[in-house]
Image: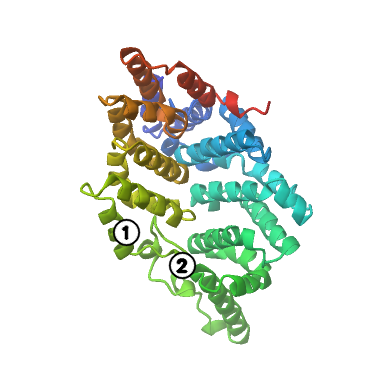
Amino acid sequence: MDEVVAYLISKVQLNNNQCRLYQTLLLELYIQAPADCDVISMTNLGDVLTSKNHSKVDAVTHRLLLSLVDINHQEKWKAKVSKANSACRKLAAVHPILMLRQLGMMSVLCQGRINVSYHEFRNRGLTTFFMNILGLMELLQPQLFKQDRKAFHSIIDAYFGVIKRYGVHKKPFENMYSRLVVLLYEYNAHFPTAAQTILEKYSNILNELSFVLPDLHQLKCILAGITLTHTSKDHAENNENSFRAETAEEVFGLASRESTASPTLLVSKDQIWGPSLIAMFTDRLGKHQDSEDVTDTLHDLDEQCSKTPQVLDNFSPDLMRLMSASSVECRIMAFSLIIKLLRQNPSTSIKFLPAFLQCLDSSDTEVIETAIKHLPEFCLLCQESACVLLEKAFRVGIDKKLDATTIISDTMQLLNMDMLTPS
C-alpha cells in the first residue's frame, strides 16, 4: 500500500492532464483505508465529503453514532456509550474529514430528539447525547465551518430547539449552553458572514442566555457583534457610501484569532486557570511530596477540571511520572486523569505511549497490573499504536506469569467495535 500511495502522489505532483485521475484514486484509497493512506492533503476536501462511495469506515461511524443514542441508566450501558464516544472523538481528531461525512446523520439524530418532554429528555439520557455531539463538533472545527453548512446549521437549529423547548434557566443544561456559545463564537471568528445568519436568527435567545451566563466572554462578544452589525446595516441604508464592513476582529473587539486561541481557554470567571493556579498544582504534584498528599492533589485536580479537562495537559509530565508511582491509588488516579485528557483531546495520545510502555516494563508487578487494567481504553484512544501495546502486554503477561488474556481479548473486541453493539 505504501508503494502504491507513493506512486500516486508522485503522479499527482506532476500536475499534468492526468493529475485529476490520480487524485481521485488517492481519494478513494483514503476513504477505504485512512490508516494506510493518510494523504488527505493531496485531495480535495469537498470531494471527500461528497464522494458517493461508501466504506467500512462509514459503516463503523454509523454504528458509533447510533451507539451514542442508545443510552440506558445501567452502568454497563453507560460504559458502552462512553467507549463509543471515545472512539468517535478519536476518529474526529485523527480523520476529521471522515467524521464530517456524517454531519447529515448527526443532524437527523439531533432533530429527531428535541420534541419530547423535559422529563423524557432527561430520563433517556439525551443531555449526554447532545453533549457528546457538541464535543465532536468542537473537535471538527475549523473544517466543520467550511463544508456542508446546511447540515451544520441544522444541528445548531436542534440545539436552539432544545433551548426554546426547555428554557434557558435549566441548570443541567448550562454547560451545554456555554459550550454551544463558544462554538458559535469560533464560527463567527472564522466565517463571520456565514455565521451572521445563525446569530441573527437566534439573537433573542442569545440575549436571554446572557442573563443566565453573565460572565461568558464569548457571549458578550457575539451580542456586541450582532448589535454592531445591525448598526452598520442601518448606517449603510442611510448613507451607503460611508459604510465600511468591519473585520471579524473589529466586530469582536479582538486583536486576532491567533492571539486569543488557547488549548486552555476557559469561559467563565469560576473556571479560570491562570499561571498561579497551575503552578500551585504543579508544586503539589512535585517529586518530593508525600504520596498521600499527591493522591489528595490528584483528587482535587480531578474535581477542579471536571468541566475543563483540557487543562490537564499542563500536568502531563507529572501524570506520566505518577503512572509508575508506588501508591496504587496514586497510580489509578494518574491513569484516570490521563484517560480523561485523551478523551478530550485524542490527538495527544501518542505522547503518553512511552510512559505506558515503561509501566509494562516495570519491575513492580502491581505497576504492570495497573497498566494492563487500563489497556482497553488507552488502546482505543491510541489506536495507531494498538498493535505495539497489545504485543507488549501479551509478552509481559507470559514473562511475568500474569493473566492478561481476558483484558487483551476485551481490548481487541473494543477495537473491532464488538463491545459497542447493543446486546
Question: Going 53% across and 81% down the picture, which residue do you hit?
Answer: 243
Name the outermost residue toward the bottom: 238
Which quarter of the figure is the C terminus placed in? top right
Quadrant in which the N terminus is drawn: top left
Using a 10 Å C-alpha cutoff, classify the residue at mark 2 as few (fewer than 14 neighbours), some (14 to 19) or many (20 or more): few
SS of the residue at dot 2?
A: helix
Name the residue carrying label 1. 278
Identify whether 237 is placed above or below 309: below
Q: Which residue is mark 2?
A: 270
Q: Is residue 104 left or right of residue 346?
A: right
Q: Which residue occupies the extreme left position in the image?
A: 288
Tag count in the figure? 2
Q: Residue at x 49, y 48 (%)?
A: 139
Q: Position of residue 136 (x, y in %)?
A: 54, 46
Residue 44 position within the rendered picture, expressed as x and y whole percent measured from the top left: 49, 40
As shown in the figure, which amino acid type bears the numbered disc 1? Ile
Work out whether residue 233 can be spotted.
yes
In the rendered structure, the answer to whether residue 1 lies left or right of residue 358 reads right
The amino acid type found where label 2 is placed reads Asp
